[in-house]
Amino acid sequence: PNITYVEFDGTAHQVEVPVGHSVMQGAVENNIPGIDADCGGECACATCHVYVEESWLPQCGTPGEQERSMLGFAATAAPNSRLSCQIRVTEALDGLVVRMPEAQH
Ligand code: FES
């Protein structure tokens, strides 16, 4: 599936991410700046915070308890915030667009 990552400054990166990988891995594997992923996908750092385009929120599933509590630590969290390591890539996410916050915390 094709995923577009948009940096805070508007720079867009469109890449192919294999099914089964997380949206966070897709960014790291393609050296896309703006997702730090300090904990390596353990849902324990909140530095893989992204904003999911509203129309894509349902396809991204529901954040779990731990993700919701970690997002509480992200200073710039919004209703469409997700931790990208907790979004598993499926064919249904082809065309997904996520935006990165100004900085990860
Ligand atoms: Fe640490 Fe997602 S990579 S919470």
Image (spheres, grey):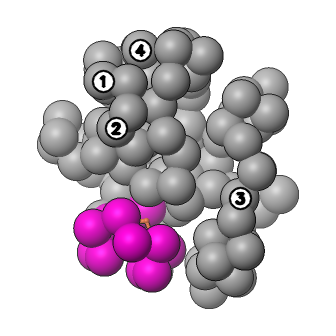
Q: Is residue 10 visible?
A: no
Q: Main secondary structure of the magenta part?
A: loop
Decide if residue 28 is on the left or right side of residue 49. left
Label 4 to label 3, Cα distance in Å? 22 Å
| Secondary structure under the numbered disc 4 in the rendered image | strand
Instruction: Compute the Cα span from label 3 to label 2.
Output: 17 Å
Specify which label sits upstream in the sequence, 1 or 4.
4
- Give the label on residue 2, or none: 4
Marker disc for residue 21: 2
Which amino acid type corresponds to the residue marked 3 in the rendered image? Pro
- Disc 1 on helix, strand or loop? loop
Magenta stretch in the rendered image: 37-48
The answer to whether marks 1 and 2 mark residues whose Cβ atoms lie closer than 8 Å is yes
For badge 2, the amino acid type reads: His
Q: Nearer the viewer, residue 79 or 76?
A: 79
As drawn, 51 above or below 53:
below
19 above or below 64? above
Could you say where residue 91 lies in the image, as x and y percent from the top left?
51, 14
Q: Can you tell which mark lies on residue 18?
A: 1
Question: Which residue in the rendered view is the most extreme toward the front?
Answer: 20
Q: Which residue is mark 3?
A: 63
Residue plotted at (56% across, 27% down):
97
| Among numbered discs 3 and 1, the one appearing first in the sequence | 1
User: What is the three-letter code of the residue carrying label 4?
Assistant: Asn
Q: Position of residue 2 (x, y in %)?
A: 41, 14
Across and down, in percent, residue 32 comes to 25, 42
Q: Report the Cα–Cα distance between label 1 and label 2.
A: 6 Å
Evaluate whether residue 31 shows in this view. yes
